Image (spheres, rainbow, N blue to C red):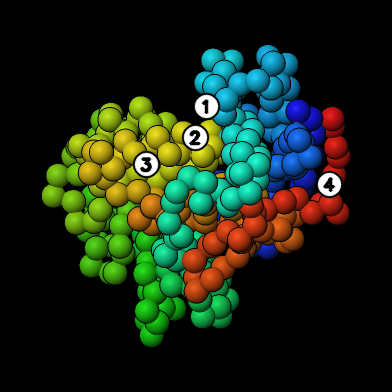
């Protein structure tokens, strides 16, 4: 088995500001696996909260994993070996995505079909970051030029406070008043308990469908006070990274948002979905700053997920990968074997074998 690493710079068309800061570019690590004449692809989107801040850190961890002799291990054994070696989740995700891609290509099946999953029928949300109302107006109008778009996810939790959040959201309502658009809200942990209570009531009266991560990661003990009498469904994101986290919070939330970079790829994502459904929770799948490779892997399992937020590749200039499609607002994979995506050769910045 041959492993190649490709470091690629990603630039956003529009900077994305959330409660924790602003993001306008990133550097991702792409993993190329070649075995039995089959080439497979994975992607790592580094992040401090996911255990590795840079593509270089990710590569170091993955080389440590490869040096532990994983060629003869099953896909599940590789995942466990990586956990045992303390490989960060975003690094595990890249390897896991590539190995699932290879496994499906070996079977000459799409990853979705290999897993026995249905095709998604859920349109993706398109994210609108924290910006002054006049920029929010421009951004929403531009997004809605695409008639396929059916839902927006609005980032709130501004450092300027909840009054500024209200201005942002009010502009979204004004810009969508004549359109049938679902509106979801993600505070990215930007509110205190009292602010969350106030904002959830205010948002519930103004078309919001749910609230995601209202409280900062680490304040999960306060969710019980927010959950009781809640006017909106509550989803957690940063507070739920792995399947074992679901059991800790299921009594005080309505759903969980999983991300491949946060949990370590397809293998753990499937476990999270099973545990969440066993506890009667709704499910959502989201993304970090990812190209069509990681997005296509996530889209391969989105047919069993209630809410979809797979839109980061639409905001890349350019997307360095081929593969993902939008069909009637739904982020889809193509019909090719594996997850269907690959890195464009002209996108390579550097290659380390």
Q: Which of marks 3 and 4 is nearer the N terminus?
A: 3
Check contact, mark 3 vs mark 1: CB within 8 A: no
Q: In this view, does 207 lie to the left or right of 183?
A: left
Q: Earlier in the sequence, mark 2 or mark 3?
A: 2
According to the picture, the residue beneath numbered tag 4 turns out to be 348
According to the picture, the residue beneath numbered tag 2 turns out to be 267
User: Quick one: SS at disc 3?
Assistant: helix
Check contact, mark 2 vs mark 3: CB within 8 A: no
Residue 309 locus on image (x, y percent) = 47, 56
Q: Nearer the viewer, mark 4 or mark 2?
A: 2
According to the picture, the residue beneath numbered tag 3 turns out to be 273
| Image-quadrant location for residue 200 | bottom left
According to the picture, the residue beneath numbered tag 1 turns out to be 76
Check contact, mark 3 vs mark 4: CB within 8 A: no
Q: Which of marks 3 and 4 is in front?
A: 3
Pick whichever, 133 or 280, lies toward us.
280
User: Quick one: SS at disc 4?
Assistant: loop
Q: Distance between the residues labelled 4 and 1?
A: 29 Å
Q: Distance between the residues labelled 1 and 2?
A: 7 Å
Q: In this rendering, is residue 205 above or below 241? A: below
Q: Distance between the residues labelled 3 and 1?
A: 16 Å
């Amino acid at each position: 088995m041959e492993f190649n690493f490709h470091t690629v710079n990603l630039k956003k068309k529009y900077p994305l500001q959330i409660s924790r800061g602003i993001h306008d570019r990133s550097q991702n690590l792409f993993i190329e696996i070649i075995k039995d004449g089959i080439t497979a692809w994975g992607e790592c989107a580094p992040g401090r909260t996911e255990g590795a801040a840079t593509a270089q850190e990710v590569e170091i961890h993955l080389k440590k994993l490869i040096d532990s002799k994983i060629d003869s291990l099953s896909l599940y054994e590789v995942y466990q070996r990586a956990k045992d070696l303390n490989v960060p989740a975003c690094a595990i995700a890249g390897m896991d995505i590539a190995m699932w891609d290879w496994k499906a290509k070996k079977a000459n099946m799409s990853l979705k079909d290999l897993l026995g999953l249905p095709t998604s029928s859920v349109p993706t949300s398109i994210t609108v970051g924290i910006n002054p109302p006049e920029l929010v107006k421009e951004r929403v109008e531009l997004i809605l030029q695409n008639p396929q778009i059916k839902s927006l996810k609005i980032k709130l939790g501004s450092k300027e406070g909840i009054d500024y959040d209200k201005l942002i959201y009010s502009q979204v309502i004004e810009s969508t008043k004549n359109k049938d658009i679902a509106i979801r809200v993600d505070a990215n942990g930007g509110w205190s308990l009292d602010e969350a209570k106030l904002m959830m009531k205010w948002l519930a009266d103004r078309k919001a469908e749910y609230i995601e991560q209202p409280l900062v990661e680490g304040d999960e003990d306060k969710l019980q006070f927010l959950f009781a009498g809640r006017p909106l469904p509550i989803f957690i994101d940063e507070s739920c990274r792995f399947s074992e986290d679901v059991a800790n919070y299921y009594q005080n939330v309505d759903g969980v948002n999983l991300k491949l970079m946060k949990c370590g790829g397809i293998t753990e994502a499937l476990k999270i979905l099973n545990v969440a459904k066993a506890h009667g929770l709704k499910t959502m799948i989201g993304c970090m700053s990812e190209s069509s490779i990681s997005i296509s892997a996530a889209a391969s399992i989105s047919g069993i997920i209630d809410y979809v937020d797979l839109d980061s590749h639409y905001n890349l200039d350019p997307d360095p990968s081929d593969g993902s499609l939008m069909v009637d607002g739904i982020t889809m994979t193509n019909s090719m074997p594996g997850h269907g995506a690959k890195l464009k050769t002209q996108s390579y910045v550097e290659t380390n074998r």
